[in-house]
Amino acid sequence: MKKVIVIGAGIGGLSISIFLQKAGFDVHLYEKNDKVGGLCSGYYVNGHYIDHCLHWLMGTNKDSKLYELWNEVGALSNNVPIISLPTLGDFVYENQIVTFDRDLDKCEKEWLSISPVDKRAIKSFFATVRDVSSLMEYALKHPKYKKKKDLISALPNSLKVFKAMKESREDYSKKFKHPALRFALRNAQTGYNNMFFFFDLYGIFIKGNADVPSGGALYMSKRMEEKFLSLGGHLYLNSNVENIITKDNVATGIKIGNKTEYGDIVISCLDPTFTLNHLLDNKYRCVKIEKLNKNIANNPISSAYCLYVTIEGDISNISVPTCLHVKDLKVGSRKIESILIRPYGFDKEYFVKDNKTVVSIFIDQNQDDYHYFKSLSEDDYAKELNRIDKKIIEEIEKYFKNTKGKIEFLTHFSPIELNKHTNTSFGALQGFSFSSKSNFYMLRPTIKGLSNLYICSQWNRSIGGTPTAIESAKSISKEIIKKYL
Ligand SMILES: Cc1cc2nc3c(=O)[nH]c(=O)nc-3n(C[C@H](O)[C@H](O)[C@H](O)COP(=O)(O)OP(=O)(O)OC[C@H]3O[C@@H](n4cnc5c(N)ncnc54)[C@H](O)[C@@H]3O)c2cc1C
């Protein structure tokens, strides 16, 4: 039986471990943290549960091929309730609320009543959402479409959709005159300033394919851990891999402290930049990764500043999520214009305790913000985080008056903590993106000069995320099964 060493028990590592263990390999999975999940995880603070990740999960619709994959690894099943939130968000600008409702007809009417002069732009926006929605529905049901024309035929207005792939949300928003609509579109999605990603998200959301599994990220990754162990896999927590050992073009094993573990195949399921620079000591090259890192301004990564609080009492007046316009708030290297507030009362069993609801506040960050935080001394860093938290809480209390005096700090993290947690470059929570000045990329999962070393994670193609992690794991496991079994 071939022995496989897998480094990193995030979604990519857990998934490939399950696929290979199931296929008959002897899989040994090493994770540096004390629990599995990586970026897709959660924990308890003062008895309150914090979901560190899942705002929405692509593949929650049982008709989609992605659901089948989540089901295969034990992440989703008939026993896991899926929660469908009514909207993708309320966007509040100077007391005007703009909603991205699940019901497009209703939503279109609301937008028209907010700004009749924007009729043309509004009609065009909703037509594109409907187009992308049918494209994504087709693509998710038939991920193996062989011909481009099959894909195009699923799409009534392909030109508009493909144009949006290169358009920033900021430029797109300028098609609208009303400042609240502009604000909503500029801030419509966290990360990646690319209009296509938002059309994509909204399109799959209205089809029920981007909902939330009850219990969130911690319990989802725990179910995957249970699946792996039930198949006879070996999991080693608190095992920080320091090196991948190589000899004569072969990866022979790994080093953890003064221990060495040997295997026939090694799979590194974390950021490939870290794998190349640290685990392989810069001895091997991946030109594509080097280019992406060099051209990072045009392939930005997405990170986050997150504050977690509890709010006491009834907060049903705060929609899930609410994006609030803020003035004079600098987070990381720049002034930001919005905060995304997510009260978790929709999943009471996990997130409401003693009449207090867990609420997360999410702020977009990128590689420049990581560098900013990194440049601060320990003291200044702590002060800076306290300043940011205080200001966020003031903004929430100012708009939602019923929260005044009822907000309690739980914890916070910046790109620095994300980096420490999973070794992800710049504290990225997803992989490299693309912009009008760059293109979608895909990596070969092997590294030149090493025949049996694979890289498998969300970084295998833009734009990353949990779907990329599990889909890469599936396709790489097939390649390994074909070669070694
Ligand atoms: C705040 C936040 C919100 C998010 N929201 C969403 C969302 O709504 N929907 C969605 O789909 N995705 C979301 N994501 C992104 C999602 O979490 C990631 O895309 C996904 O989890 C990446 O999985 P991965 O396995 O590729 O990488 P990772 O999760 O980075 O896994 C890598 C693993 O390797 C381990 N590791 C690293 N170095 C070593 C070493 N030397 N030795 C041993 N182990 C090591 C790490 O600890 C980690 O467990 C969010 C993430 C964050 C942080």
Image (cartoon, rainbow, N blue to C red):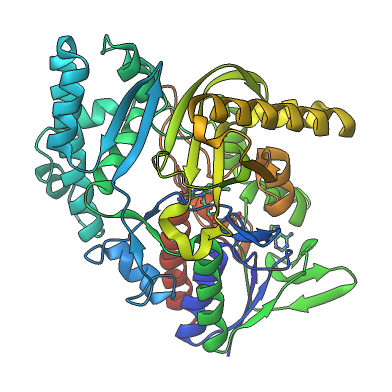
- Can residue 220 be seen in this snapshot? yes
Left or right of 273 on screen, residue 462:
left
| Image-based side of 285 in relation to 156, left or right | right
Q: Position of residue 28 (x, y in %)?
A: 65, 79
Does residue 142 appear anywhere in the picture? no
In the image, what residue occupies the spot 45% across and 49% down?
A: 55
- Vertical side of 408 occupied by 68: above or below: below
| Image quadrant, ligand 1 | bottom right
- Residue 484 lies, in percent from the top left, at 50, 80
Q: Position of residue 269 (x, y in %)?
A: 60, 61
Quadrant in which the N terminus appears: bottom right
Relative side of 234 to 188, left or right: right
Q: Is residue 425 above or below residue 218?
A: above
- Out of 256 and 205, give the one closest to the viewer: 205
Q: Nearer the viewer, residue 414 or 386?
A: 386
Name which quarter of the figure residue 429 lies in: top right
Left or right, 5 with respect to 143, comes to right
Give the percent coordinates (x, y) of residue 17: 54, 74
